[in-house]
Structure formats: C-alpha cells, structure tokens
Image (cartoon, helix red, strand yellow):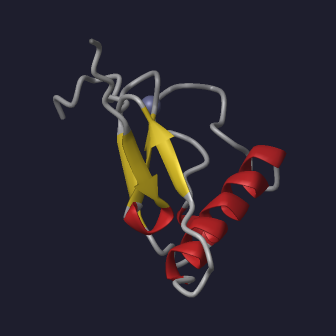
Amino acid sequence: MTAETKTTLQLSDITAVEFECKNCQRVVSLPLPLKSANQVPTFCDCNVPRQWMPVGSDAHRTLLALMDYIQRYAKATDEPYVLRFVTTGLSARASGGKD
Ligand SMILES: [Zn+2]
C-alpha cells in the first residue's frame, strides 16, 4: 500500500508572497495585504540585465490581479464554498533555505 501526502492551502492561509532572484538568490518577501502595487519588485539589484517584470507588462498586471484576488477572497468568509489549492509537495527555495 502506498501512502500519498496531500497538502491543501486556502487563500486565507497565504500571509506573504516571495520573489527570489534566480541569479543571486536574493529573496524579497511581501506580507499581505499589500499596501501598494509599488511594493511588487520589478527587478533585482544584482547585475541581471533583464527586469523581472516591467511595470505595466502582462506579467505585472496579472500578478497584481492575482494578489488582489487572494486578498479579497481571504476576507470573503460568507462564500458558499471553500476554495483550496492542492499540492503533493512544497517548493523549496533555490538556495535550499540557507538564507
Ligand atoms: Zn539578483
């Protein structure tokens, strides 16, 4: 018999989002709710010439919409359903959590 571990995550469980630079492993953590869209990092201070997501780009707008949805739904306790994300594992930082 094989046991499967399943983890569920509700939007109200999300307390912050993290961005990690693939070049220098710098991590920027933003607690939710966001105070301003300007808090979302669009680049890293290291010498990567490519921005993470230019302001106004599809990626930037979509990320802001996602974060807005997470914040709104986390407060919407009167919905007639519970939305959960299901995962079979948890992601680890590229740095292996050694920061
Ligand atoms: Zn970097």
Residue 76 quadrant: bottom right
Left or right, 22 with reference to 52: left
Left or right, 59 with reference to 2: right
Q: Quadrant of ligand 1?
A: top left
Visible residue check, residue 30: no
Point out residue 73 in the picture as x, y percentages from the top left corner: 59, 74
Point out residue 86 in the picture as x, y percentages from the top left corner: 48, 42
Residue 48 quadrant: top right
Visible residue check, residue 84: yes
Point out residue 99 in the picture as x, y percentages from the top left corner: 18, 35
x 62%, y 79%: residue: 80
Which of the two residues, 93 or 25, is positioned nearer the viewer here? Answer: 93
x 57%, y 61%: residue: 83
Is residue 2 shown above or below 66? above
Point out residue 6 in the picture as x, y percentages from the top left corner: 36, 36
x 51%, y 55%: residue: 84
